[in-house]
Amino acid sequence: MAKLYFRYSSMNAGKSTALLQVAHNYEEQGQRVRLFTAAIDDRYQVGMITSRLGPQREASIFDATTDFSVEDFTDLACVLIDEAQFLTPPQVAQIHKLAQVRNTPVICYGLRTDFRGEPFPGSAQLLALADDIEELKNICTCGKKATMNIRVDQHGRRIRSGEQIVIGGNDSYRQVCGRCFYSNIS
Amino acid sequence: MAKLYFRYSSMNAGKSTALLQVAHNYEEQGQRVRLFTAAIDDRYQVGMITSRLGPQREASIFDATTDFSVEDFTDLACVLIDEAQFLTPPQVAQIHKLAQVRNTPVICYGLRTDFRGEPFPGSAQLLALADDIEELKNICTCGKKATMNIRVDQHGRRIRSGEQIVIGGNDSYRQVCGRCFYSNIS
Amino acid sequence: MAKLYFRYSSMNAGKSTALLQVAHNYEEQGQRVRLFTAAIDDRYQVGMITSRLGPQREASIFDATTDFSVEDFTDLACVLIDEAQFLTPPQVAQIHKLAQVRNTPVICYGLRTDFRGEPFPGSAQLLALADDIEELKNICTCGKKATMNIRVDQHGRRIRSGEQIVIGGNDSYRQVCGRCFYSNIS
Amino acid sequence: MAKLYFRYSSMNAGKSTALLQVAHNYEEQGQRVRLFTAAIDDRYQVGMITSRLGPQREASIFDATTDFSVEDFTDLACVLIDEAQFLTPPQVAQIHKLAQVRNTPVICYGLRTDFRGEPFPGSAQLLALADDIEELKNICTCGKKATMNIRVDQHGRRIRSGEQIVIGGNDSYRQVCGRCFYSNIS
């Protein structure tokens, strides 16, 4: 039986790199995979999965209207989804069934929580349904494991409220540990 | 820095046994712990944490009105919470801060999802904030890993809708794998 | 395909409790399991697996002459082996094949290293071959995770050399973290 | 307290990619790391850590004579060691102490077993002492998780005996699952 996997992390842990490596591993064995990323993520280029180490490649894009239950996944060894925090809960149910019933492994990479410490709805549903959950570990500037994210403005001041989704690069989001999250760091 | 731990599983995996073992391990070292369980859980006896292997012991009870940010946790090596799926999301935020800011480790044991496959709000928040997530594994009757739960009536017929919380024993809930969850098993 | 599982820990983590819980979980589903423990372990009673929480039950015993490749494992849902650090490396190869080729899951519980910090040969082979490795976590008196074991004599003085195997109870072995292991604690 | 980490896998799982990502993550935070790889590994270039996705960078080299207890690790946030299966057991003890006593985290990446299914001595010692063990997962051509490695000659025929260490590229080693390892695949 195939599984639904969720690899979660804070910002800048290397999720896209890990995804591209898994795709490479399958293809090196002569197996086909299909890659998805969120249309909403235009930090680099829409429809590209980009590792901060350099490598990048094209991917199908999904948005809130994508129906994974009718996509063609014939002859695929694996489906890989980046920026999976942007999946809707019904989409997570679709890919959960894809793994359980249609026997296609699905590996999702995404953030757990936003800069306010609130779960992304897609991640909450992935954490609830995934057969296998693994953290991609990252570090806070204080040296502890980073589990949360904060948002800082162009002057480096922390922003504590606002909309959940404001896509941006390293300049506006930063991973921190729980203790630093609750501290008064700006 | 102390951590917030979440050990999740499907029904009947041995969560209470694991909790009682951890309490024993601390106390054997001469350290004090405090145990909590949900007032709502009266399968065995209110305020008792009961292992299906036999051992049981008293615990403080929590309900939706409990404020963990004002409880006295002085000189405790660890706080252990059973039936943690019944925590409210604000209570999860309280114990997250207890670990991060007041440096007291908190270990929670709970179910991920209900018989409809929907996350318990407390578990969703624990999965979003816990520093360390681990699955207590269990098996489906088909031999695969059980990740979901189903509800069956007194005649063994599956119930697919209704309220999230209906406390009961082994006779009315059963753990299954994802494939069996989506099948027509009654 | 069945798997070989190794659950390792330092002393007094609750390995036997975990094993008894898994056996209970299988049997509650109407499935048969077979339990083994080391003949060499006579802390409680030869051929008994005993949880420090109280529960205990009989088990088959193994010693260095046991050949797991000729044991009868027909109609078993799972084989559970306690004190697995006392397996010989060839026995680990036997149970690895049992899982891979004969499709019977085998779950082993054992210590990683002895009081000198040297791996037990059986554990080293289990760590090398197991399909799934998981640590049962335990704590040092200093509050950190205990990963090592020390041996102390009847006066509480630490013993740093000697034979690997000297079976005994809580009075002569104690789990510690790596830092305490290298310190001059007596 | 710093930890010794061991990330193990079969061949071609992406160990070097993962190492380079972690180095990048630290450096992006303004922290210094030091990288090591085995002198013995000349598949790409001596003293280079090379990701199969493309990125590569220079590293210090170690061989059996390297004494990690006298290396200068001042002001380092982390030490990263690739091809860690080639460490000697005493070197593993040195880096274990480096983490526990001198408080410098060390993350090692390496293979568990050779093409005969025998553990590398360095990996066996890392599995025995590491504070945190994690598998980098990879797949067999049959679709199952690859946990073992096989060696094949230039005609694709399997080689079952010989020296443990014969450095080479993808053409002569291949990762397989346990079932395929024990089968008669050539």
Image: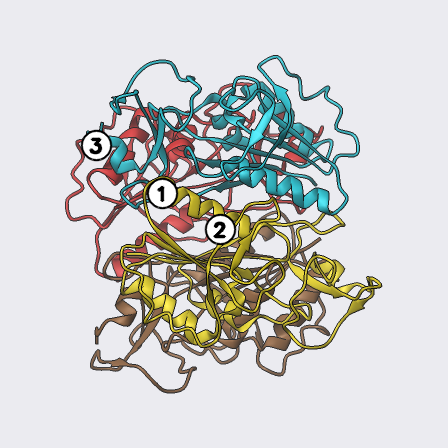
Chain colours: A cyan, B red, C brown, D yellow
In the picture of the structure, the residue carrying the numbered disc 1 is A139
Tag in front: 3 or 2: 2
Same chain for the residues at labels 2 and 1, yes or no?
Answer: no
- The three-letter amino acid code for the residue at tag 1 is Ile
Question: Callout 3, which amino acid?
Answer: Ser
Would you identify the image quadrant in which residue A47 lies? top right
Which percent across, then down, holds residue C171? 29, 75
Residue A31 position (above or below residue C77):
above
Residue sitting nearer the eye, C147 or A138? A138
Q: Nearer the viewer, residue D91 or B85?
A: D91
| Residue at figure coordinates x 67%, y 71% from the top left | C94
Residue C177 in sight: no
Circle 3/circle 2 CB separation < 8 Å: no
What residue is pinned by disc 2? D19
The answer for how far apart the CA atoms under marks 2 and 1 are is 14 Å
Task: Residue under label 3, please give it.
Answer: A183
